[in-house]
């Protein structure tokens, strides 16, 4: 992974590169950003740059032996800590067994979320991911060794928020007394769950979410047509893990579905609403959740437009036209109520409530309140 392979984040890239060039590399850095953001990618690119044998002014060379090994994440001086599906048994090296899968997982693309990883390793439904104390202790023994090839030994640590208290305290000890020429690149999407003592011993690298344009460009590189890419960018809100998940869904026109639904609610066409509820009930759960997601996004933008802050809108083309026209006709109080109704509906849908009943209940609330 090279910096040039990562869309945007130019200021962050420059700051990381400058720290190496000025010999001011913090031994522990917390890449703190959103789920599906550039955290792993930036940490990976930074690790590549640090041990590159022929650093360029603005990136690693991408050609030397070190860069070639980093491209496949097999550099002998780079160690990986990531969530395990369960606590290893006595004498079991579960981390070592899963490391080849971890490398393959990141080689596909590095913009990841925990549920994807757990699904990738076939974790069971009640396995939520854990980083046990054994793995924290293994960090100490691995990093006590001298670097084999590179200038630095590097620990690439994903999801440290899953450390239990004992494991976190074990990590804290080595952060307080790090071996020479050792880097901890800690990638978190929930830094508020980390011990404050760990946070205080790291240098924070703040990472923003991807912009809609960056998501659209990323998807275009994957062969997604522009209209579909822009719709996905609107839905995923800067989360490339979610964007990639959406590309694997059967393409549908959520806007047409939403617009039809809202028009039937506004006109109080109850016969059509019952038919739509029947149709909604036949859809797969992911598609049902997708419609609710899209509806929430449109309602939020409709709320912003009605309150005079259209500069915050992320809408394109037909969605923008719909919001402008529909926003003039709909009671503003209804939108705020319906945002809560859809949020509650999404929650119950995930917990296997009957989709038809949820949809019809929301539809009747919308029909009752939209005109004021």
Image (tube, rainbow, N blue to C red):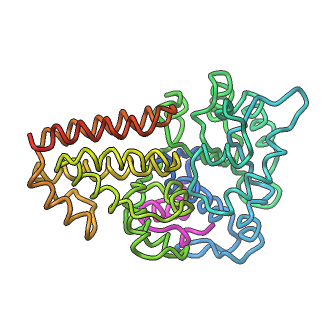
Magenta-span inclusion, residue 10: yes
Residue at the location (22% across, 64% down)?
A: 320
Count the labels in the image.
Answer: 0
* Residue sitting at the far top: 166
Residue lying farthest to the right in this orientation: 91
Residue 370 shown left or right of residue 16 in the figure? left
Q: Could you tell me which quadrant the C terminus lies in? A: top left
Q: Position of residue 153 (x, y in %)?
A: 73, 51
- 303 or 79: nearer the viewer: 303
Which is nearer the eye, 329 or 99? 329
- Residue 177 within the segment the image draws in magenta: no
- Residue, x 28% and y 67% (percent of image)? 316
Q: Which secondary structure class fits the magenta region best?
A: helix
Q: Residue at x 42, y 50 (%)?
A: 279
Q: Is residue 19 left or right of residue 60?
A: left
User: Where residue 172 sits: x, y (%)?
Assistant: 63, 30
User: Does residue 151 appear to the left or right of 10 in the view shown?
Assistant: right
Answer above or below: position of 288 versus 133: below
Residue 231 rendering spot, x and y as whole percentages: 38, 64
Quarter of image, res 161: top right
* Front residue of 6 and 118: 118
First to last magenta residue range:
1-24
Q: Residue at x 31, y 35 (%)?
A: 361
Occupied quadrant, residue 233: bottom left
Quadrant for the N terminus in the image:
bottom right
């Amino acid at each position: 992974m090279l910096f040039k392979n990562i869309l945007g984040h130019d200021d962050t890239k420059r700051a990381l590169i400058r720290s190496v060039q000025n010999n001011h590399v913090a031994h522990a850095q917390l890449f703190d950003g959103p789920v599906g953001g550039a955290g792993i990618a930036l940490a990976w690119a930074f690790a590549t740059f640090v041990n590159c044998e022929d650093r360029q002014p603005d990136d690693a060379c991408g050609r030397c032996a070190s860069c070639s090994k980093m491209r496949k994440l097999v550099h002998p001086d780079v160690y990986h800590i990531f969530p395990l599906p369960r606590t290893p048994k006595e004498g079991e090296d579960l981390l070592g067994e899963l490391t080849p899968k971890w490398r393959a997982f990141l080689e596909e693309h590095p913009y990841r979320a925990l549920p994807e990883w757990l699904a990738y390793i076939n974790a069971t439904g009640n396995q939520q991911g854990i980083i046990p104390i054994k793995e924290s202790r293994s960090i100490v023994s691995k990093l006590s060794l001298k670097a084999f090839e590179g200038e630095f030994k590097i620990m690439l640590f994903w999801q440290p928020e899953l450390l239990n208290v004992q494991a976190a305290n074990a990590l804290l000890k080595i952060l307080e007394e790090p071996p020479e020429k050792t880097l901890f690149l800690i990638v978190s999407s929930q830094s508020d769950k980390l011990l404050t003592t760990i946070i205080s011993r790291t240098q924070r690298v703040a990472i923003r979410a991807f912009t809609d344009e960056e998501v659209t460009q990323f998807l275009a590189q994957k062969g997604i047509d522009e209209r579909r890419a822009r719709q996905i960018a609107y839905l995923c809100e800067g989360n490339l893990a979610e964007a990639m998940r959406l590309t694997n869904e059967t393409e549908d026109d959520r806007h047409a579905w939403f617009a039809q639904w809202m028009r039937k609610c506004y006109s109080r066409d109850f016969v059509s609403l019952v038919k739509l509820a029947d149709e909604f009930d036949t859809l797969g759960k992911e598609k049902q959740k997708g419609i609710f997601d899209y509806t929430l996004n449109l309602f939020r933008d409709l709320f912003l437009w009605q309150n005079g802050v259209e500069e915050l809108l992320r809408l394109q083309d037909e969605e923008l036209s719909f919001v402008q026209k529909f926003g003039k006709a709909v009671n503003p109080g209804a939108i705020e109520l319906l945002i809560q109704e859809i949020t509650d509906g999404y929650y119950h849908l995930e917990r296997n409530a009957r989709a038809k009943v949820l949809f019809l209940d929301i539809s009747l609330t919308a029909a009752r309140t939209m005109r004021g």
